[in-house]
Image: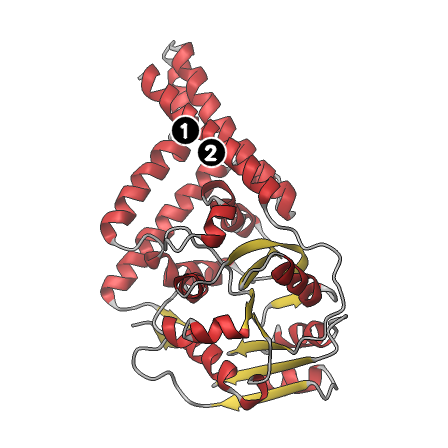
Amino acid sequence: MTTFAAWVAAANVLLLAHTAVNLRLLRRPTSPSHTSEQVCILIPARNEAGAIAEAVRSACAQTSVPNLQVVVLDDASTDDTAAVAVAACDDPRLAVVTSDTEPPPGWLGKPWACQRLADLPATHAADVLVFVDADVVLAPEAVAAALALLRTHNLDLVSPYPAQIAEGVVQQLFQPLLQWSWAATLPLRLAERSPRPSLSAANGQFLMVDAGAYRRAGGHAAVSGEVLEDVALVRAVKRTGGRGGVVDGTNLATCRMYTNTVDLVSGYTKSLWSLFGSPVNAVASALLLTTVYIAPLPCAVISAAAGHPRCAAWWAVAYLAAVVSRLLVARRTRGPLWSTLAHPGAITMLLWLLARSWRGRRAGTLQWKGRVLA
């Protein structure tokens, strides 16, 4: 058992080292520069009356981007999303389009909304498309800074990961896993240029793509049935010779994904089944996560109580390495520091949501915003 504990500790230390290197390599937008490019911010919105106003105002307030257009698509909302969006900003660059068209067979709601936005005549002249969720608030320099990074590093797509606003114990426990998951596991610079599907990460909350690269990749039509359409779009861009991935958007945008625990559970239940590709991969990943991240803390306590100090020490090293990995990411992304100590609890919740997601997938009961996910 001591040897096994040592191997788990070594794995966690290596992941900690990878996290530290990754955070140093993570591209961070620098001072934005004035651009003459045509930029179009596209905001798909469905039943977002409570959040859309702030998102629209922040989009219209972008600096150093004179050739800017903001287009909101009210995607068959049953609330006042369109009216709130129109009233949010008196700006001739803002257009609010309403649609009652439901997704055709083979399409999920968000890819369908994004593709309709990209197909609007108003976007055809754009050099750069910026997809922004309706619960995202952009800093005034966000688009210009992200565009400078895109062009400076000759990338085709960048996904500036927003700072996540998490309120309440459950959200603060679980939400930081988003940033930590790619910071700890994905070799970021290699992932930018590798066409391998496994080396891809993105966040559709704020995603900027060169318009030409987007068209070459087939746009959202190429990812029409994907629950994680953002990651799938990165893969499509890279398949057609493009480069890009996650960059640091902590100072560029904020996002409040969920306002309560019920919505958080529903949101992750709808999509986690697709994270590992198949039930077999999901089970294998669950066993690995349990061994590496859940087991160390209780095993350290049990080993110490049983009079096995060396074994307990190795388990303790494994637990502490995971905590420090989480802590590094939390400091970089302005996440809650206390939740780093509860990392085993966050992973336990992840596995519960993963199982719940697969049950819903098999039963055909997964829904989001009133639409069934086939």
Question: Is 265 on the left or on the right of 329, as rendered?
Answer: left
Question: Is 57 on the left or on the right of 23, as rendered?
Answer: right
Residue 341 appears in view:
no
- Quadrant in the rendering for residue 285: top left
Q: Front-most of 85 and 302?
A: 85
Query: Dot 1, crowdedness within 10 Å: few (<14), some or many (≥20)?
Result: some
> Residue at the location (50% across, 35% down)?
18
> Residue at the location (42% across, 74% down)?
220
Residue 275 appears in view:
yes
Disc 1 to disc 2: CB gap under 8 Å: yes
- Quadrant in the rendering for residue 356: bottom left
Query: Dot 2, crowdedness within 10 Å: few (<14), some or many (≥20)?
Result: some
What residue is disc 2 on?
15
Question: What secondary structure is found at the residue carrying circle 2?
Answer: helix
What residue is disc 1 on?
11
Q: x, y (%) of residue 23?
A: 59, 41
Q: Is residue 207 above or below residue 307?
A: below
Q: Is residue 366 above or below residue 335?
A: below
> Residue at the location (26% across, 54% down)?
278
Q: x, y (%) of residue 350?
A: 40, 48
Q: Front-most of 184 and 174?
A: 184
Q: x, y (%) of residue 166?
A: 59, 54
Q: Quadrant of the N terminus?
A: top left
Q: What mark, if any, has residue 228 been given in the picture? A: none
Q: x, y (%) of residue 308?
A: 38, 10
- Quadrant in the rendering for residue 330: top right
C-alpha separation, residue under disc 1 versus residue under disc 2: 6 Å
> Residue at the location (41% across, 46% down)?
349
* Colour setting: secondary structure
Q: Given the image, on which type of amino acid does mark 2 rest?
A: Leu
Q: Is residue 303 above or below residue 76?
A: above
